[in-house]
Image (cartoon, rainbow, N blue to C red):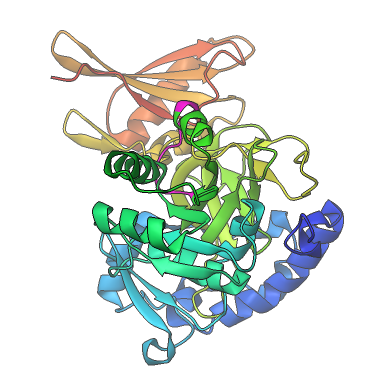
Amino acid sequence: MSEFYDALETRDPAAREKETFARLPEALARAMGAPGWAEHLKGIDPKSVTSRAALAKLPVLRKSDLPALQKAMPPFGGLAVTPPGKLKRLLMSPGPIFEPEGHDKDAWGAARALYAAGFRPGDIVLNTFSYHLTPGGHIMDSGAQALGCAVIPAGVGNTEQQVEAIAHLKPSGYAGTPDFLKILLDAATKAGKDASSLKRGLVSGAALPSSLRTELSGRGVDVLQAYATAELGIIAYESSARDGMIVSENVILEIVRPGTGDPVAEGEVGEIVGTSFNPDYPMIRLATGDLSAVLAGQSPCGRTNTRIKGWMGRADQTTKVKGMFVHPSHVAQVARRHPELGRVRLAVTRESEQDVMTLYAEYTGGSEGLTDAIAASLQSVTKLKGRVSLVKPGSLPNDGKVIADERPIG
């Protein structure tokens, strides 16, 4: 059996780019058949969006804005092409954010990630993601079934029952959070139940420290990670190379400067923005609120798509200073007024029981007049006074933070 799920994974990168953007105009036109997308993309000619540069000119849609959109235009903010009654499932995530599932065999693209993690047709999969209202359980369930696996729909909790099911049904695969896998293995050991059938796992939804991965491997379970959202499905996944996460073949991924829709240079940490080809619930430049960075080169496993470092924190660094909200978009707006600057970072501290803002900006050249001009821009945009400190290029951390709240807690 092939090491790869299909031939798409090993395409020449230039061919992938060409084929992907050849599909995009039709996907955009279909999306704009929904009233929410028609409004959001008003004035856009789908036929003109045939490159990354053209895509980057479209407005981003922030995941954090979905609850308000859905409240104003229920149930899905006018973003679903398919009417609610013709969908397969209507789901709900915390927020609340409501998500539809269409009738595609593998609507969220999980089969590819499962395959990369070693799952094969005929495997039995213990799926411990929640099936109650939320999409998590259904994302992995649909992917496993599309792959030809049998699924134990375990869901969350009921540890003793799950251990009993493992001992009796002998699943070879696990899908769920990494910490719950450890709980199950510990419970099986304590109860004297055989959990040795579990050989591989695809985990998501929680951090996988190297120490936990090593422990699980030592107990016989080889675990890889996937990064997903309910709106975009599987965005990226690990392979046996364990060298970054490979972007899914059905998602266009961009890394943008937080608070903007502007793509950053390769290697720079920024916010993950995804565009999907879901025919029922398309997403066009959805800003996930998560940080990551593109890794240079291709995966040693032979898959040729872009790789990212994985989840690196949250992009929404909004903070309150002197009773006023300061957003990453504010910092980005100041930077746009002064294009000669490099990376910028707003630090918020406390001095003499007062909030203090300092904008650090990378710059080469004389500072005469520039610091005053930047300070004026900062006050104009945020309505708050702040200091400006010009620093050498490369001196600010490449961690995606544009606002660093350094005030003491408590």
Q: Quadrant of the N terminus?
A: bottom right
Is residue 298 positioned above or below 360 on the image?
below
Residue in view at x 32 percent, y 43 percent: 192
State left or right for residue 336 relative to residue 243. left
Specify the farthest residue to the bottom: 85
Say how many tags the image has: 0
Please name whichever residue, 50 or 221, is drawn nearer the observer in this view of the structure: 221
As for residue 208 lying within the magenta part, the answer is yes
- Which stretch did the figure color magenta? 203-211
As for residue 163 lying within the magenta part, the answer is no
Magenta segment, prevailing SS (helix, strand or loop): loop
| Quarter location, residue 188 | top left
Specify the farthest residue to the front: 192
Q: Position of residue 185 (x, y in %)?
A: 37, 42
State left or right for residue 328 relative to residue 394. left
Is residue 291 positioned above or below 169 on the image?
above
Please name whichever residue, 286 or 118, is drawn nearer the observer in this view of the structure: 118
Q: Position of residue 285 (x, y in %)?
A: 54, 59
| Quarter location, residue 149 | bottom right
Please name whichever residue, 232 or 357, is drawn nearer the observer in this view of the structure: 232
State left or right for residue 292 relative to residue 178. right
Is residue 75 positioned above or below 124 on the image?
below
Residue in view at x 64 percent, y 37 percent: 242
Residue in view at x 46 percent, y 39 percent: 333
State left or right for residue 208 relative to residue 351. right
Examine the rendering and report whether any part of residue 285 can be seen: yes
